[in-house]
Image (tube, rainbow, N blue to C red):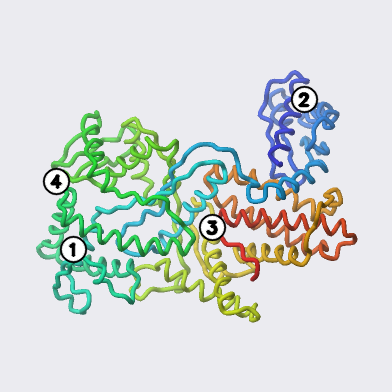
Amino acid sequence: MFQRFIEEVYDILKTAIVDLGWDNEDLSIDYYDKISDVSSSLAFKISKRDKKNPKKVAEEIYQRVYPLRDGYDLIGDIKLIGPYLNFYVSDKFISDTLKDVLTRTDNYGSLDYKGSIVLEHTSANPDGPLHIGHLRNSILGDCLGRILKKAGYSVDIQYYVNDLGRQVAVVVWGIENLNLNVSDQRLLRYNFDADMIPQNIKVDHWISQVYINANRLIEEDNDTFGHNKKEIDILLKKFEDKDEDVIKKFDFVVVQCLKGIEQTLNDLDIHIDKYVRESQFVFNGDVERIISRLKDTEYAYYEDGALLLDLSSFGFEKDFVVTRGDGTSLYSTRDLAYHAWKAQRYEDMIDILGADHKLISSQVKTVLKILGYKEPIVVIFEFVSLPEGSMSTRGGRFISVDELLDKMKRQAYFEVDERRQDLSEIEKKEIADMVAIGAVRYDIIKISPDKPTMFDWRDALNFDKRGAPFIQYSHTRACSILKKGGDYGKPNFDLLKDKNEIDLIKLISRYPLVIKEAADNLRPNILANYSRELAEQFNQFYKDVPVLNAATEELRSARLALVDAFRIVVKDSLNLLGISSPKIM
């Protein structure tokens, strides 16, 4: 509805410009104006061009547009304040907004079909559990996927599995050479079977232990003869040469680690459509075809047997390495084959990458351009930090997402238990889990991806900080009111005149526009901030406007319908952020 209102404002301004004999101008519309519903600073641009007084120009435009307002359904009033033209919504806008929400329910805010997108996120190496460094990638990617679907795109969510990377080779070597059940690390041969994995540890955490211990031995060996490092290189070469025994061992490590990672993602309500292995592009010949094509470009040259591309003409100081000296491909080379594969199947590609990938992602885009493929849209995010001393892991190396979620769930349970001792243990645990996951997701996603953020569990779970628990509780409050209020029948929305009511309806009307903005800019934080603002506005309405004890039954019915409209929109917005909407808290 708000989009239609904006379109009417554009139309009435264009009509005025034509009547005045002026060229088609940038209408300079601001729909986040605090004084009006929409304002235009068009007079400034025209006055600058024609060297006129902006107030006089605004007066000329106003004299043209004001008589035209009755020809528009959604424009209620137009006021001239200084050199600004201020537009206000009509009563019909108010009633039509609520009718639209209550009719379309979950589909409110959904936009028309726009095309297909493949979105890759997380793609952590299969050498251990997800850690706090991966968390922003996963949540950002998941939220973007949900928002893009709402905005009309067909979205395929993919996790690119580095199944032939050096890290996997290190784990394979570790399983072959470490006795994982004794402290002195005596050699013991394993048959790469799931029975070897201890039952008292999550499998991806076990993989991490193998990787850390094996890597330590390899690093120590490098100080002497480097035999272990050479064995890793041999494993990688055998894998690319399709050695069946080595492939089986690599596959075991990858499958087991992904089981643990997928369990963590599911805990966060993050779902992957396809796990795409990079090895498939080696084995089907795609990587070799990419290498062959790059050899023939003007940018290619060899150094110590390695194939490189000189990208200095594109502004890069560092050259792009295509193959190592022994002829094996690199992750970045295989990434080219993956993107070429995606470009042939989807209209657009989106990659979610950390700030440490800025250079290599820019180089990959450039090489894809050289090859004639569509370039991906890359969303770069800055990193998440934790307050010093707030959490620590036994190894001191990293904080796993599993550890973070366990802590959040325990703390959330204490909060719920203190507030709702009337609930059963099962109910309290279910609510605590929803609050904990919501708190983590919201605290991460509320900040623009290009800004670093610090995650503090105390702030995330604090109702007064107006994060996810605050928004979730607003939904719970709406559900409680509706349960007590019963059926509201066919309400008369013309009775809604209170400023708190109108402000809430106007904010609800902006929801489709917020979806479009978040999708167009690939910024889920736009939706996160809107959700908080919507909850704040609802709580102000709840505080100042009686619903169940309204002056008349007709007014009570209209206000209940407004509460229901809020419930629909806030629930949908939380869903797009991957956050549950509990009915009780």
Disc 4/disc 3 C-alpha distance (Å): 46 Å
The amino acid beneath tag 3 is Gly
Provide the secondary structure element on which disc 4 rests.
loop
**Direction from residue 257 to residue 97 in the image, left or right:** right
Q: Can you give x and y, in whole percent of width and height, for residue 399 in the image?
A: 40, 68
Say whether marks 4 and 3 touch (CB < 8 Å). Answer: no
| Disc 1 packing (10 Å; few <14; some 14–19; many ≥20) | many
Judged by depth in the image, the label closer to the viewer, 4 or 1, is: 1
The amino acid beneath tag 4 is Asp
What residue is shown with label 4? 326
Disc 2/disc 1 C-alpha distance (Å): 75 Å
Q: Earlier in the sequence, mark 4 or mark 3?
A: 4
What residue is shown with label 3? 578
The amino acid beneath tag 1 is Trp
In this view, the residue farthest toward the right is 552
What residue is shown with label 2? 16
Query: Compared to 146, does 296 lie above or below?
Result: above
What residue is shown with label 1? 173
Say whether marks 1 and 3 touch (CB < 8 Å). Answer: no
**Direction from residue 448 to residue 551 in the image, left or right:** right
Provide the secondary structure element on which disc 1 rests.
helix
The numbered dot on residue 52 is none
The amino acid beneath tag 2 is Ala
